[in-house]
Amino acid sequence: MRATSRPSEPVADAPPQIVLEVRGLTVEFDSEDGPLRAVDDVGFQIRRGEIVGLVGESGAGKSLTSEAILGLIRRPPGRVTGEVRFGGRDLLALDESALARIRGKDIAMIFQNPSASLNPVFRVGEQMLEAMALHLPERRSTLRERVVETLARVGIPSPAARARDYPHQFSGGMAQRVMIGMGVSCVPSLLIADEPTTALDVTIQAQVLALIRRLARELGVAVLLVSHDLGIISQMCHRVLVLYAGRVVESAPVAAIFRAPAHPYTRGLIECLPQLEGTARLGAITGNMPGLRALPTGCRFHPRCPIAEPRCSTESPALRDLATGHAAACHLAGTR
Amino acid sequence: MVRFVLSRIGQTLAVLFTVSVIIFALMRMIPGDPVLMRLGDDFTEEAYERLRGELGFDRSIVTQYLIWLGQVLRGDLGDSFLNHERVSRLVLEAFVPTLILVLASVIVGILIAVPSGIVAAMRKDSLWDWGSMGFAIFVYSMPSFWKGIILIWIFSVYLGWFPAMGYVPPWTNLSQGLWRLVLPAVTLGTFFSGLVARIIRSSLLEVLDQDYVKAARARGVRRAALVYKHALANALIPVVTVIGLQFGALLGGAVLTETVFAIPGMGRLSVNAILNRDYSVVQGTILVGVFAVVVVNLLVDLAYAFLNPRIRVA
Amino acid sequence: MAQPLEADGRRFDPEDVGRPGPAVAPAAPSRTSLGRWWRRFARNPGALFGLVVFLGIVAMAVLAPLLAPYDPIAQGVGTPLEGPSAAHWAGTDSFGRDIWSRIIYGSRVALVVGIVAVLLAMVIGVTLGLISGYYGGWVDVVIMRVMDGLFAFPIIILAIAMMAVMGFGVRNVIIAVGVGFIAPFARVTRGDVLAVKEEPYIEAARLAGVGSLAIIFQHVLPNVMAPIIVQGALRVSGAIITEAGLSFLGLGPPPPTPAWGRMIAEGQTFIVMAPHISTFPGIALMLAIVALNLLGDGLRDTLDPRMRR
């Protein structure tokens, strides 16, 4: 495991207010084989100033969860049910224009491939200006200055000149900085970062993550960090949710997850991480995550689980609280 | 950008060279003595020998080609066998109506294709989509000369809205000129629009799937701006290249359309020439026609380079 | 951390918004069974329509003597310039000939020109494309420059030029149209050859000592056939339109041989009093073209799902 420098828990006398509350979020797609449930009854809360990690393999439903929050999933063929409470409203009940007012202003989102997230035929400064002009009341001339300020703040050298450049002239890391800058320019309450560093070099990764962490702290922005990389999660997050085949299988503060993982899947994931000390063999989880068309009965992980019992193939385990803030969906959690 | 421009110009020159060789070769393959043909009625022994020498027939084929090329580049395309007029003048006179027809057709085509393609993409798989694309395939498959005749039948003979034939240059009489252009421009323009509408539709659909559209939407950009600003700006760029590629087909279609509507353009000139074995004129029309196609392609490519920031700003 | 792979090496990721289902990975093109192709093809109503109509036209051409009620070049079998009637389904032309019979026989010219010209262009063009793509180097440059030159000619104009040299008539139309279509076939083939050339199985064959010609024709060619067939179907419609255009201009088969293009031209003079003379051959022509275009589109969707829109 990498040497962790975990952020300190947000210190407060009373728990900070809840920024986002997701309940029973379900995303289904119509297919020739019937409806496929890619996200199944996912729920969590994010408080002000928290960085919450959503971790899982490719195909587990992480990106769909984050996109569902902002209403980015195309309704046919997709179907989103549940509740996403933000700012006193259920985002899933809002229409497109109401959502458009929230997007980029109160909730911002950055994506995995930063170079592809910018329109190639418009200058970068223009796109940033457009985003700001949509949400901020100031005049365009004032906003132009803010564009340059934002670029400077995220560490882009010669910001005024770079604002006139086109996206293809930016490296991946620089582009992601631009996206982050755009994302926080209107000081949102929540920043959703969907695999923000997966497409970047390792050295750039660290810089971008540090930037996110710094800005979150400075501006008091809560962050939902989606990743498949436990190492990143351990460095960045206060709390973690583990997703498997569309369901939350464990949810805990990051220290607890690494110290005492309750769900066999989480345990398996941690064992897969290479250790710097010792010569233990690299762990692996046998088998593959099931495709949506062939979901196992009962606990979805049971075919690959080293401690599965007969009960696990028939009864689906509910998410149970084990200790404060630590929940797991396993019949055998807390034992063994 | 500069490098792109230079390389494209180089390519164009190479193509023009190849084309000139092909035309020269074709003309040489025409059965009969070319010197005799050029002299026509003015045959005398000494004129024959002199012309033979001038054209280099006593020397290698390469030299003959070079002499011919020199003449062409100087604008000397010879004389028409029929009426002894300068081919260059005949061709240029005929080129103007053809160009006007093609331009009008492109405008008509774009006016139809762009809204049609956008609607089809935005309401994909709906009645609008099938209807638009069905119409596009329909007009694209109709042979232009037949379409012209049918249009004449409906709008000229039956309804009497437009004149059946004839051409008036727009600068002589703007309203008459344009009025007479309507049916021919619609004939050729709908053909063009059939192709372009399908391309706009698929281009737009592809662009709408791109990450930057999703990211813009996640920033709060409204639907209208997403489509008409972000998506269209990208989707229309490849359409520009298509226009260039189709210019050749348009010119071919113009040849037929001119015959239907009795427009005194390149089409009529070349067809009459070939039926009358007036080979100088045939050569002249082909040279100018293909030259125009190649140059238009070059211009279109340069326009594309200008519009695409990835090329314009390295 | 290992990402899960499906059994055949693809990654299953329904995270693509609005696009449920597995992404299609470009697999090495293989010989799929005819049955599977047919089922996929048959799902496309337009393509089926195109196929049926095309086969119908072929049948019409082949069975012309049986199907035509009158001799197509016999004058005076009916009152001239009469509209459609029970005796003459498509009416008669200015010479009193039965138009329906002429349409049936006209399909022969259209199909012969269309198919033979395209086959000619295909054989030459594909060979040039294979050589150009596989060997590369200056052979490639020279061939492609010549193709570029040819490509610059609009088909009608090239045909006119060639027929100035060769004279008119069906045979020369076939040659002219065929030559005009060489360039597109060469280009398409070359493009695919360049891609296929880098595939591991070609490399393997080369290392095993298989001769270049054998590689080209036994390994490369089968894998680039799909887009060539699609081009072929689409070009046949282009060839038919071009032939019709040339006949319309008077450069096609000489009278009295029935050719749809010339029938349309003959009808233009009588458009006021006898519009049927131009209309019916035009409908036949258009039907043929639409059918071939739909067929070509259908073939494209069947043989190469990657190109599907």
Image: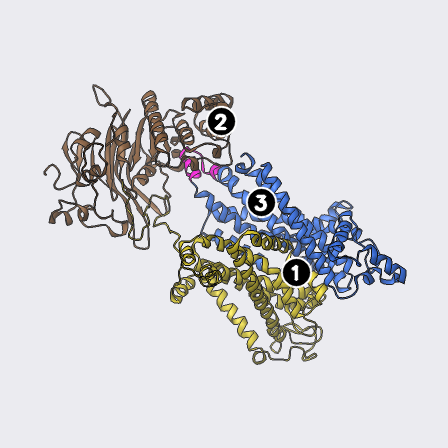
Chain colours: A brown, B blue, C yellow
- Depth check: give the residue in front, A133 or C303: C303
At horizontal 26% and vertical 24% (from top left) the residue drawn is A7
Check disc 3 and report its element: helix, strand or loop. Answer: helix
Left or right: B142 as drawn, with respect to A167:
right
Q: Residue B288, image x and y in percent?
A: 72, 51
- Marks 2 and 3: which is nearer the front? 2
Give how far apart the Cα atoms at labels 2 and 1 are: 55 Å
Q: Name the chief secondary structure element in magenta.
A: helix
Query: Against C209, is A4 above or below?
Result: above
- Marks 2 and 1: which is nearer the front? 2
Residue under pointer 1: B145
Residue under pointer 2: A162
Q: Is residue B262 visible?
A: no
Left or right: C226 as drawn, with respect to B182:
left
Give the crowd class for mark 2: few <14, some 14-19, many >=20 residues within 10 Å. Answer: some
Q: Is residue A248 visible?
A: yes
Chain ID, mark 3: B
Chain ID, mark 1: B
Give how far apart the Cα atoms at labels 1 and 3 are: 26 Å
Q: Residue A88, image x and y in percent?
A: 30, 29
Check disc 2 and report its element: helix, strand or loop. Answer: helix
Q: Quadrant of residue B135?
A: bottom right
At horizontal 51% and vertical 39% (from top left) the residue drawn is B228
Residue under pointer 3: B240
Q: Residue C168, image x and y in percent?
A: 70, 68
What residue span does the magenta drawing correspond to?
A: B211-226
Image quarter (top left, top right, bottom left or bottom right) of the N terminus of chain B:
top right
Give the crowd class for mark 1: few <14, some 14-19, many >=20 residues within 10 Å. Answer: many
At horizontal 37% and vertical 24% (from top left) the residue drawn is A187
